[in-house]
Amino acid sequence: MKHNYHIRPAQDTDLPALPDIERRAAALFQDFGLADTFATVLTPSESYQEGLEARRLWVAEDSEGHLLGFALAGVVAGSAHLDELDVLPEYGRRGIGSALVETVCQWARELGFPAITLTTLSQIPWNAPFYERLGFRILQPDETAAALRDLLQSEIERGLPGQNRVAMRREL
């Protein structure tokens, strides 16, 4: 089955759709009792704007121009960092998330970053296990940079679950 989508840099006109994509993707956490949490602890709108201006925000779009997902990157502790990745649930398991991650990794390589990091939950199949299949590994506390530990803590303070929350890294 061919999936018609492409990844492109985000545009101003895409920004209003991103919170809805993030909110709808949160429904996937229903079986883990986290859907309400992820539907309310959303990426701040200024982060989208900053990502757009810094050219580190990408969207997946179908052939009719509908947005299917997005990825937002940043920099933490001298490494590229995947801040957010969301795909509409009805378009899951079609390679869109993987393609967005690879787009972010390519951006990081082009800028000369040695690695890319992210934070996620270790026990949910489309979180840490998904990223492990893409070459990421869970960092042990003693190899996690202070800035990345601070980010994990700030995410927990914003309301994201702290249990099973991990930092991951992929060498580039």
Image (spheres, rainbow, N blue to C red):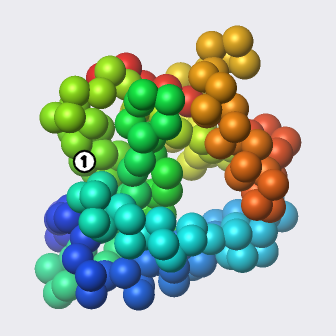
At 20% from the left edge and 34% from the top edge, which residue is drawn?
Answer: 111
At 20% from the left edge and 85% from the top edge, which residue is drawn?
Answer: 65
The one of 166 and 145 positioned closer to us in this rendering: 145
- In this rendering, position of residue 78 left or right of residue 26: left
Task: Reply above or below: 72 against 106.
Answer: below
Place residue 30 in its image quadrant: bottom right
In the rendered image, residue 167, in percent from the top left (x then y), is placed at 62, 32
Residue type marked 1 = Thr
**Considering the image in quadrants, where does the C terminus appear?**
top left
In the rendered image, residue 82, in percent from the top left (x then y), is placed at 45, 46
Residue 135 visible in the current orientation: no
**Residue, disc 1:** 103
- In this rendering, position of residue 132 left or right of residue 68: right
The one of 61 and 172 positioned closer to us in this rendering: 172
- In this rendering, position of residue 139 left or right of residue 5: right
The one of 125 and 102 positioned closer to us in this rendering: 102
